Amino acid sequence: MTKILRTLADLRVWRADRRGVGLVPTMGALHAGHRSLIERATNGNGEIVVSIFVNPAQFTNADDLARYPRDLDADAEIVAEAGGTAIYAPDASEMYPAGFATCVSVTGVTEDYEGEARPGHFDGVATVVTILLNQVRPDRSYFGEKDFQQLAMIRRMHRDLSLPGEIIECPTVRDHDGLALSSRNSRLSESGRQAALVLSSTLFAMRDHALDNLESPRRLTVMGAVLISANPAVALDYLEIVDPATLDPVDALAQGSRALVAATVDGVRVIDTIELIPR
Ligand code: PAF
């Protein structure tokens, strides 16, 4: 039976005598991508706590926050099935006590891409993840590669601030047709979902070309942009090939080089990423 922890005090009592604790931070609306993070966490941890907190500080748009799907019962079922032992579902006041006046801000890796499109978003994520890591003090925390810029930021701040535990990076989970799983996908219409598939299929094509021909990043991104732009329902925001640590665009492909893409489909922001040259 999954234990539901609602307050920091409950969490502290639960955490006190437990060793080997894995943390899977989420905003709820759990799907197979989260399930795979939880399942991965069962490997090596005696206890797995899934945090479910829709973090207002990382939303740049009030509508987006209001429309974010919330269903604790459905989430609790997924957590239990996947092997989670506790859910930490605090109120905002547990995360941001009255008079909260602190912001964790990571420079460099957060500046472009999602950082440019969603000003303030990464400060909100950095702040809440710092709070969660300090509250839970996990031995390991699990983050998906799908939000690759978020992951790069978390790796950086984890090192910079000596935050507790180890950060474990987990591969993107895709639907049978290639679409990267995301809680936002539920807001796509059927035709929007079909249109969004051009993002993953383009990334796969870029990876195949990169592996076969070691083409230049410039040629690959031009090729990718042409493929995506052929679909009028998809408004491409960026398509870039970057160094996996700094996220700076690269002039030549190297191990770990990553393609990052973002577009708007049906008014929904869809992002995806792929490693072009395996490490
Ligand atoms: O990736 C997410 O779901 C969120 O950004 C996170 C890491 C749970 C912080 O709110």
Image (spheres, rainbow, N blue to C red):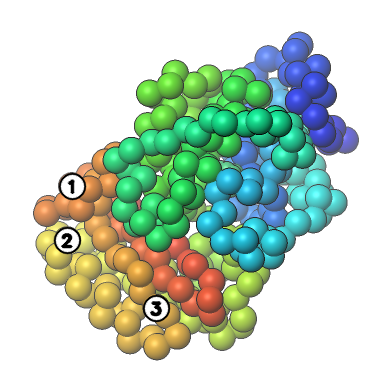
Task: For label 1, count other residues whose C-alpha is less than 10 Å away and answer few (under 14), some (14-19) or many (20+).
Answer: some
Residue type at tag 1: Ala
Q: Quadrant of the N terminus?
A: top right
- Judging by the rendered image, the residue that carries numbered circle 1 is 254
Task: Classify 10 Å Cα crowding around label 3: few (below 14), some (14-19), many (20 and above).
Answer: some
Instruction: Tell me if mark 2 has few (under 14), some (14-19) or many (20+) residues whose alpha carbon lies within 10 angstroms of its own.
Output: many
Place of residue 230 in the rendered image (x, y in percent of width and height, measured from the top left): 33, 86
| Three-letter amino acid code at the position of disc 2 | Pro
Task: Tell me which label, 2 or 1, sits earlier in the chain.
Answer: 2
Q: Are marks 3 and 2 in contact (CB under 8 Å)?
A: no
Q: What is the distance, in whole Å, between disc 3 and disc 2 at their CAs? A: 21 Å
Rendered image quadrant of residue 224: bottom left
Q: Secondary structure at mark 3?
A: strand
Query: Which mark identifies residue 235?
Result: 3
Q: Nearer the viewer, mark 3 or mark 2?
A: 3
Which amino acid type corresponds to the residue marked 3 in the rendered image?
A: Ala
Structural distance between the alpha carbons of marks 2 and 1: 10 Å
